[in-house]
Image (cartoon, rainbow, N blue to C red):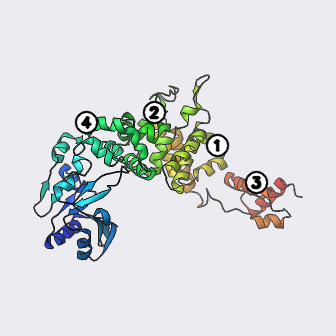
Amino acid sequence: MKSIPNIEDACGIIAKLADAGYTSYLVGGFVRDKVRGVPPEDYDIATAARPEDIQKLFKQTIPVGVSFGVVLVVVNGLPYEVATFRSDIGYSDGRHPDSVRFSGPKEDVLRRDFTINGMFYDPGTDCVIDYVGGKEDIEKRLIRTIGDPEERFAEDKLRLLRAPRFAAKLDYKIEPQTANAIRKHAAEITGVSAERIREEISKILIGPHPRRGIELAGDFGLLKHILPEIETMKGVPQPAEFHPEGNVWEHTMLAFDHLPASPEIELAMAALLHDVGKPLTFKEEDRIRFNGHAEIGAELTEKIMRRLRFSKNQQDLVVDLVRQHHKFMEVQNMRPSTLKRFLRTERFDLHLELHRIDCIASHGNLENYEFCRARIEEFSKQAENALHPVLLLSGDDLIEMGLKPGPEFGRILKELEDAQLEGSVVTREDAISLVRRTAGLK
């Protein structure tokens, strides 16, 4: 069984539709990538067959949007979107057509978003069918709406954000009339659901040019409606001795240049938000300071992550990354037990990577980064439980020693674990002696 969508299975679907008398083409991202000469990511199919025809022809289908002519055809366990050629009529909600009319390929193209996404490919003749100038715009490296941009953006407000996303992903420019329409209607992005905005922002952040995507969203006036907290970073100065790169916004944008390829979304969001608390904590004393910015930033991050409907696990991880990112300044002065607790933080790999990015995007000093890496390697060569020692005593042991269960138990057990991490307690007898001293027992 093949594990990813592929051209062979997609062409098999088209061939079967053709045998039944239905004109069918690959459409959208596949054709755009083929014209660009890069490996395709999508294998969507447009066809003259109606949904009921598609369901009759194929053994396994999923009717995900029959009213809009969309059916998933499952081949080798993988779904391929097959949609009937259609024209859309009215967009009262700024997202879905009020009704659809099944039509032909040219009418179908005219309802789509951008010219680069509006071409068909006929595998039978190996021809690209282009009614809207998509090939020319790819040659010019332009993002242009199909037809009137005012109409296209009115149909689906998310296209206001998709344009910068595609421009960033492909490193294209946005055609002037399209760009003007985005600026004019930027405030209307607030009418799009948080989930859809989250998906577009995520695609920008984990894509090949996240900095450009965020900068374009800011330039077109979208960012102040989607992530106003990020807009406030612009122009906030930083102490030159630690941040020679410039203000908070410039530092954050530079951080994107040093993200790994295809980063986890949690790391990318943390890179975007790690200094979001600085505008609220800016003070000029002996020098510019941002006291408490990590904690304030964590509070803002929680609100942003919740607002964008990220999962609870994603929220917790990104909030923790923001809250703890400043701790790396202290690692070389931490007690061994404190350092070990920090190094065993869940997903410490992301904490460490965020710190690397933060440093490279500012002063460039990776001393604390290398220190942590060296300690992790050192501890990995020691006992398997060097960072997670098995406690030598349990709560039951404390009860047997005459202690009553309560909040004090937690403090004693933490002190015991600290001693084990420090190496001052090695045996059970050491542990008993420590507890007796701590609890004041004879």
In percent of width and height, residue 288 lies at 57, 25
In percent of width and height, residue 380 lies at 55, 56
N-terminal of the two: label 2 or label 1? 2
In percent of width and height, residue 396 lies at 78, 67
N-terminal of the two: label 1 or label 4? 4
Q: CA distance from mark 2 to mark 1?
A: 31 Å
N-terminal of the two: label 4 or label 2? 4
Q: Residue furthest top?
A: 286
N-terminal of the two: label 4 or label 3? 4
On screen, residue 430 above or below 337: below
Which residue is denoted by mark 4 in the rendering?
A: 177
User: Element under label 2?
Assistant: helix
* Kind of residue indicated by mark 1: Met
Q: Residue at x 31, y 48 (%)?
A: 155
Comparing labels 3 and 1, the label whose residue is closer to the camera: 3
Tags 2 and 1 touching, CB below 8 Å: no
Q: CA distance from mark 1 to mark 4?
A: 57 Å
Numbered mark located on residue 334 in the image: 1
User: Element under label 3?
Assistant: helix
Q: CA distance from mark 4 to mark 2?
A: 28 Å
Quarter assignment of residue 214: top left
Q: Mark 3: few, some, or many residues within 10 Å (few <14, many ≥20)? A: few
**Which is nearer the eye, 382 or 102?**
102
Tags 4 and 3 touching, CB below 8 Å: no
* Kind of residue indicated by mark 4: Gln
Which residue is denoted by mark 3 in the rendering?
A: 411
* Kind of residue indicated by mark 3: Arg
Which residue is denoted by mark 2 in the rendering?
A: 249
Q: Residue furthest right?
A: 442
